[in-house]
């Protein structure tokens, strides 16, 4: 997502700045703490959370749609009468409710959760995981659905984005820096530092592992479509 890319670029600027190690570490942690505050205040634009993935075939031809967010959203688009074709790039955002939970809450007239306030940056409570029983793919929604949701029940799953989209690439960029650990990064971003260590990223063991694999892709695979540079 755009938020992850922006953080990665800024962290890389710190790393390549040529400053002393202590200054680099302090700068990175201070920057991540500011990101945490922006997320808590809900000042991060929805577009920064959007993830994009291309459909390789028709939505109905995917046997594992429940494990693929873009397919889940594409099927919802088809159900709503919107045109969806092979090779379309589908945007989606992961929310705290699954589609079935959202529909049930809307039908029951459930109240929307309280929104964050400007004072939330003084709150040191860590972000917590969604209590939804749905998988991350079942909690994917098209950005237009979220914007049009008058019930305001559709809320971005901030914990998921921090855990799956922000911490892994930040950890990989900072791994060579002595004195900057994964728990420090997690704490700066508002997550429980006791749940993170270098080994946390060594082996994926959950349904979101495929997203981490995108980050871990080899150079050979990443640049397979490029021509070799001849000098």
Image (cartoon, rainbow, N blue to C red):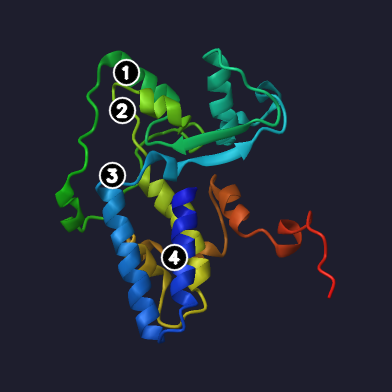
Alpha carbon separation for disc pair 4 and 1: 40 Å
Residue 229 rendering spot, x and y as whole percentages: 81, 68
Q: Which residue is mark 2?
A: 153
Please say whether residue 190 is visible from this viewpoint.
Answer: no
Alpha carbon separation for disc pair 1 and 3: 22 Å
Residue 208 is labelled as none
Mark closer to the chain start, 4 or 2 = 4
Q: Residues within 10 Å of mark 4 (few under 14, many from 20)?
A: some
Alpha carbon separation for disc pair 4 and 2: 32 Å
The answer to whether 187 appears left or right of 145 in the picture is left
Alpha carbon separation for disc pair 2 and 1: 8 Å
Question: Callout 2: helix, strand or loop?
Answer: loop
Q: Which residue is mark 4?
A: 10
Residue 223 rendering spot, x and y as whole percentages: 74, 59
Mark closer to the chain start, 4 or 1 = 4
Mark closer to the chain start, 1 or 3 = 3
The answer to whether 176 appears left or right of 181 in the picture is right
Residue shown at 59% from the left, 35% from the top: 68
Residue shown at 44% from the left, 60% from the top: 7
Q: Nearer the viewer, mark 4 or mark 1?
A: 4
Question: Callout 1: helix, strand or loop?
Answer: helix
Q: Residues within 10 Å of mark 2 (few under 14, many from 20)?
A: many
Q: Which residue is mark 1?
A: 106
Residue contact at pointers 3 and 4, CB within 8 angstroms: no
Q: Which residue is mark 3?
A: 42
Q: Nearer the viewer, mark 3 or mark 4?
A: 4
Alpha carbon separation for disc pair 3 and 2: 15 Å
Q: Nearer the viewer, mark 3 or mark 2?
A: 3
């Amino acid at each position: 997502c755009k938020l992850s890319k922006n953080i990665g670029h800024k962290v890389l600027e710190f790393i390549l700045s040529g400053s002393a190690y202590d200054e680099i570490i302090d700068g990175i942690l201070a920057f991540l703490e500011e990101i945490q505050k922006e997320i808590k205040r809900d000042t991060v634009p929805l577009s920064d959370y959007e993830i994009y993935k291309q459909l390789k075939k028709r939505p109905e031809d995917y046997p594992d749609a429940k494990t693929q967010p873009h397919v889940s959203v594409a099927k919802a688009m088809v159900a709503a009468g919107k045109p969806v074709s092979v090779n379309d790039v589908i945007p989606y955002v992961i929310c705290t409710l699954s589609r079935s939970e959202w529909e049930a809450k809307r039908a029951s007239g459930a109240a929307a959760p309280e929104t964050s306030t400007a004072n939330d940056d003084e709150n040191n409570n860590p972000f917590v995981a969604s209590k939804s029983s749905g998988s991350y793919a079942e909690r994917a929604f098209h950005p237009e659905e979220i914007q049009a949701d008058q019930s305001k029940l559709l809320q971005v799953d901030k914990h998921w984005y921090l855990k799956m989209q922000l911490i892994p690439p930040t950890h990989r960029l900072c791994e060579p820096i002595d004195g900057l650990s994964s728990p420090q990064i997690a704490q700066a971003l508002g997550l429980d530092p006791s749940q993170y260590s270098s080994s946390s990223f060594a082996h994926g063991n959950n349904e979101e592992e495929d997203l981490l694999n995108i980050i871990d892709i080899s150079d050979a695979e990443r640049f397979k479509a490029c021509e070799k540079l001849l000098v």
